[in-house]
Amino acid sequence: KRYNKIMDKGAEELSENMKLLPLSGIISCYSAIVVMIHFGFNHGISQYQGGPAQSSSDYTPIVFVSGAVLSLLYSFYWQQSYTTFTEYFRLKKEFEAKLLEEPPLLTDLKYGNKRRENAAILCADRCAGNLLEQLVPFFVSMFMYATFVDAGGAARIGWAWFVFRSFYPFAFKRFPLLFASTLPAYCCVWYMMGHAAYSAAN
């Protein structure tokens, strides 16, 4: 509670320019994604002939996929902060215009029950949380597929998974369109894991 009071008191002195920090993080992550896509398709998939990985260099195609996926994850982290600050300053203006009875508290929006009641913050939280939840099965299945089936194929499926996961923020607000993001991504994981297990067994 003491920490929350200190944080809320400090938040009262913040200006809307504070949003520039997470916004710069989002832009940086998107830039990293563009770089990973460039190298992934010019020095990754196109340079690989196919087949199971025989050496560390054969994993090159999925290194770029991994970089893009992690950049997407951190862009979602930054989006959480940006959305929280945006909503805080919006509600603060509404309070000053006497449209709200109580002033907004940054800690309520970031850590308390208010974040569940705010649609924008809930969306940002679920985008980051859901992607984080899916990373372990994705990475494990992709590296398994590259090791036992096809490294180039693992990268191609990995890029497909990346595309499906990248429009989760858009789909989250338009249920049941959400399934167009999650279900194909699940299929990518199960396809790679199933084929890798079958190849390993034979």
Image (cartoon, grey):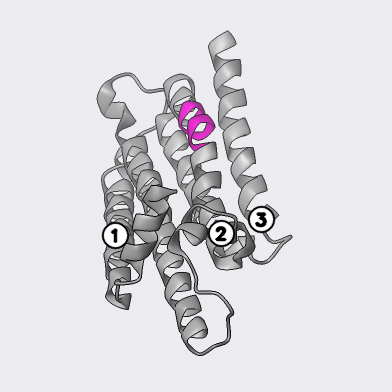
Q: Closest to the observer: 7 or 55?
A: 7
Q: Does residue 44 appear anywhere in the picture? A: yes
Q: Main secondary structure of the magenta part?
A: helix
Under mark 2, the amino acid is Arg
At a point 68% along the width and 66% down the height, the residue shown is: 174
Region rendered in magenta: 134-141
Q: In the picture shown, does residue 200 fall above or below 40?
A: above
Residue contact between numbered discs 3 and 1, judged by CB atoms under 8 Å? no
Query: Is residue 197 found left or right of 8 in the rendered image?
Result: right
Residue at image mark 2: 115
Q: Magenta stretch containing residue 86, yes or no?
A: no
Residue at image mark 3: 180
Q: What is the x, y in percent for residue 156?
A: 46, 43
Q: Does residue 202 appear anywhere in the picture? A: no
At a point 61% along the width and 32% down the height, the residue shown is: 191
Under mark 3, the amino acid is Ala
Select label 1 or label 2 by which is in front. Answer: 2
Q: What is the x, y in percent for residue 8?
A: 39, 62
Residue contact between numbered discs 1 and 2, judged by CB atoms under 8 Å? no
Q: Magenta stretch containing residue 138, yes or no?
A: yes
